[in-house]
Amino acid sequence: MATVARVTTITARSDTSFEDATRSGIERASTTIRDITGAWVKEQQVSVEGGTITAWQVTLEVTFVLED
């Protein structure tokens, strides 16, 4: 039997780093999506105020296996 996976896009934001935004996004997604097998960081953005980075944001393509 073949394995079939699906990809969904999520966005996560952090006040500390891209790594934290990525981790938080995957942890939150895993509370409602089962069998996550990987993720691709599709986009990274920062918010800037007064010349200082105030937030880091990532757009993730999350892959998960579909159940039978």
Image: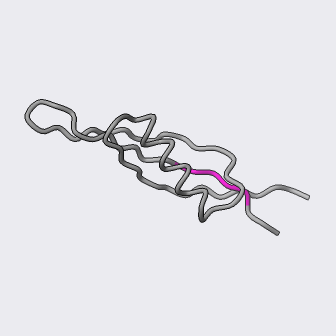
When the figure is inspected, residue 9 is found, relative to residue 56, above or below; the finding is below
Q: Is residue 61 left or right of residue 6?
A: left
Q: Residue lying at the far bottom in this picture: please name it.
A: 68
Q: How many marks?
A: 0
Q: Residue lying at the far top in this picture: please name it.
A: 51
Q: Residue lying at the far front in this picture: please name it.
A: 16
When the figure is inspected, residue 68 is found, relative to residue 8, above or below; the finding is below
**Which residue is rendered at x = 12% and y = 39% of the image?**
49
Q: Is residue 64 magenta?
A: yes
Looking at the image, which is closer to me, 2 or 34? 34
**Which residue is rendered at x = 34% and y = 36% of the image?**
16
**Which residue is rendered at x = 69% and y = 47% of the image?**
37
When the figure is inspected, residue 24 is found, relative to residue 20, above or below; the finding is below
- Magenta stretch, main secondary structure, is strand
How far across and down, in percent of the image, does residue 64 sit?
Answer: 67, 55
Colour scheme in the image? one colour
Q: Is residue 62 left or right of residue 1?
A: left
Looking at the image, which is closer to me, 57 or 54? 54
Question: Can you tell which quarter of the image residue 43 is in?
Answer: top left
**Which residue is rendered at x = 67% and y = 52% of the image?**
36
How far across and down, in percent of the image, does residue 30 sit?
Answer: 61, 56
Q: Residue lying at the far left in this picture: please name it.
A: 50
Q: Is residue 1 left or right of residue 62?
A: right
Q: Quadrant of the N terminus?
A: bottom right
Residue range in magenta is 61-65
Question: Can you tell which quarter of the image residue 38 is in?
Answer: top right
How far across and down, in percent of the image, does residue 31 sit?
Answer: 59, 61
Q: Quadrant of the C terminus?
A: bottom right
Q: Is residue 44 magenta?
A: no
